[in-house]
């Protein structure tokens, strides 16, 4: 993997998350009845940051959960080797909530398709909205994000590397060339 | 790490890392059974066949529940009403099930090594649900999972296993699993029910129940299978209870929060008193709940792996 360009640094990621939090509050007219669910792995940390930001602005705690979509993947039967199954932690009722689903990168849309299936098994939210730090295009399913940190046009030969302090020790988004 | 083995035949054949992977995967699956919709689509379109040559309710039902929570289709074959009665061999039965394009066979058999033989002959997955006196890997895995959940770790634990060790596949699988993960195991039984040279597996033995319990963090109490008693080896039921039964008096002399496990079904008043079975130290029903998560993990892991180990 060859690094080509840094798209977001720590400041840039912070600003994007703050803006997304504001947009979520604006669209939902406050934070009442709101909950946030992050997709493993890095979506979880972004979801936690968005929640903290919403709390700072609105002064209300926002229920925040963790979703592992492995068991809902559409390529499970094709995958070579076993993907690791991690824990899903949604310990609150999602019925009739406005649920914001969070991931780091939106690409083909297949992860989001799996996440929607998983969420419906937990209940019937009033709405599901999608927030992503990066939208890199190349959708293979009719899915779009409601809140986007940054749109980055990419080629399929490139990969988008999101690094976060919680998992990688630093905050940055890079574009790399697959070799 | 990745899981590569198509079969689960015994804990003897697994590395400590593979055992840990099953336990970690089971921990993730446990949450599924707490949902309102207790089902995930991971094994949608797969077929699991329960092939039981010995009567079993809890293991068979536990596997069936586990497979269904993963969205697999489950077929139960009771051998008393099948072609086995007409003299079909085990391998022929297995090959026929494979020809039906089933994906996993879950088998219990009264002959030690039956699961290994079937796994060798077939390309589809075989899960050993108990073979003779050999192994019952998923029972040991759920015992170890429960221990780990209660005490946080396995390394360094003192675990006593009490009962008919000689005829117990549950004991053998537990010995393999526990010693591989670094626990210290003490077996306690009348001498005649302790296999000779079992100490070579790295365990201690005793016929003094209080000694076995004295330092134990957990005790796994095996079922006395009096229905298999052919007269010779088994002590009288009352004598057994007097010498080896887990009672409140014996519990009082052990570590205060020692965990009491039993694979079920319990013979109350033979292996343990009702007070102990229903008491604060008992995790017997939690073992049943954990059994589903562990079997979901095993079904999930073997279902896409291809490697033959025997």
Image (tube, rainbow, N blue to C red):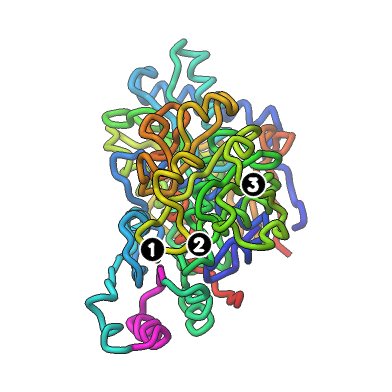
Rate crowding at label 3 as few (under 14), some (14 to 19) or many (20 or more) other CA atoms within 10 Å.
some
Image quadrant assignment for residue B30 = top left
Q: Left or right: where does residue A18 sit relative to residue A34?
A: right
Q: Image quarter for residue B288?
A: top left
The residue shown at (27%, 83%) is B85
Q: Which residues are magenta?
A: B88-109
Numbered disc 2: secondary structure: loop
CB atoms at circles 1 and 3 under 8 Å apart? no
Q: For the image shown, how many numbered marks are present on the structure?
A: 3
Parent chain of label 1: B
As measured in the structure, the alpha-carbon distance from the residue carrying label 1 to the one carrying label 3 is 24 Å
Figure check: B267 above or below B306: above
- Residue A23 locus on image (x, y percent): 45, 26
Q: Residue at x 31, y 89 (%)?
A: B87
| Residue linked to disc 3 | B206
Q: CA distance from mark 3 to mark 2?
A: 17 Å
**Measuring 59% from the left and 54% from the top, which residue is drawn there?**
B191
Q: Nearer the viewer, residue B42 or B274?
A: B274
Above/below status of B105 relative to B226:
below
Kind of element beneath mark 3:
strand
- In this view, the residue in front, A8 or A81, is A81
The residue to which callout 2 is attached is: B167
Q: Is residue A86 left or right of residue A7?
A: left
Q: Residue at x 40, y 22 (%)?
A: A26
Cβ atoms at labels 3 and 2 below 8 Å apart? no
Could you tell me how far apart the alpha carbons at marks 2 and 1 are, in whole angstroms? 10 Å
Quadrant hosting residue B192 = bottom right
Q: Which mark is residue B173?
A: none
On-image quarter of the N terminus of chain B:
bottom right
Location of the C terminus of chain B (image quadrant) = bottom right
Report the disc number at residue B228.
1
Q: Nearer the viewer, mark 3 or mark 2?
A: 3
């Amino acid at each position: 993997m060859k690094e080509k360009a840094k798209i977001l640094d720590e400041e840039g990621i912070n600003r994007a998350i703050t803006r997304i939090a504001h947009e979520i509050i604006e669209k939902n007219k406050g934070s009442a009845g709101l909950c946030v669910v992050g997709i493993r792995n890095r979506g979880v940390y972004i979801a936690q940051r968005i929640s903290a930001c919403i709390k700072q602005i609105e002064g209300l705690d926002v229920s925040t959960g963790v979703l592992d979509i492995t068991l809902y993947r559409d390529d499970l039967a094709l995958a070579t080797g076993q993907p690791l199954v991690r824990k899903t932690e949604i310990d609150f009722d999602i019925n009739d909530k406005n649920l914001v689903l969070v991931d780091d990168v939106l690409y083909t849309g297949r992860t989001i398709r799996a996440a929607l299936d998983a969420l419906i098994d937990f209940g019937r939210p009033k709405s599901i909205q999608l927030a992503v730090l990066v939208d890199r295009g190349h959708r293979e399913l009719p899915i779009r994000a409601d809140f986007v940190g940054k749109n980055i046009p990419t080629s399929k030969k490139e990969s988008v590397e999101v690094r976060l302090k919680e998992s990688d020790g630093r905050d940055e988004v890079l574009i790399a060339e697959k070799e | 790490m990745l899981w590569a083995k198509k079969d689960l035949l015994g804990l003897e054949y697994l590395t400590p890392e593979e055992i840990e992977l099953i336990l970690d995967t089971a921990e993730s699956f446990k949450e599924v059974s707490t949902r309102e919709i207790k089902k995930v689509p991971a094994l949608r379109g797969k077929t699991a066949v329960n092939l039981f040559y010995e009567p079993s309710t809890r293991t068979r039902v536990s596997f069936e529940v586990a497979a269904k929570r993963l969205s697999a289709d489950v077929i139960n074959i009771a051998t008393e009403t099948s072609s086995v009665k007409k003299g079909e061999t085990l391998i022929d039965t297995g090959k026929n099930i494979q020809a039906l394009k089933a994906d996993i066979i879950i088998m219990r058999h009264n002959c030690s090594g039956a699961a290994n033989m079937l796994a060798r002959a077939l390309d589809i997955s075989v899960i050993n649900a108990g073979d003779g006196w050999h192994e019952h890997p998923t029972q040991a895995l759920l015992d170890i999972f429960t221990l780990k959940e209660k005490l946080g770790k396995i390394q360094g634990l003192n675990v006593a296993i009490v009962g008919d060790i000689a005829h117990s596949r549950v004991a053998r699988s537990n010995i393999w699993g526990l010693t591989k993960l670094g626990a210290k195991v003490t077996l306690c039984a009348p001498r005649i029910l302790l296999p000779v040279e079992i100490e070579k597996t790295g365990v201690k033995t005793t016929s003094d129940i209080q000694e076995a319990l004295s330092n134990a963090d957990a005790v796994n109490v095996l079922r006395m299978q009096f229905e298999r008693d052919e007269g010779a080896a088994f002590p009288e039921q009352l004598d057994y209870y007097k010498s080896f039964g887990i009672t409140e008096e014996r519990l009082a002399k052990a570590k205060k929060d020692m965990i009491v496990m039993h694979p079920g079904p319990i013979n109350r008043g033979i292996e343990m008193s009702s007070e102990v079975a229903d008491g604060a130290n008992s995790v017997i029903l939690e073992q049943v709940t954990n059994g589903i998560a562990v079997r979901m993990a095993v079904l999930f892991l073997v279902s896409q792996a291809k490697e033959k180990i025997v």
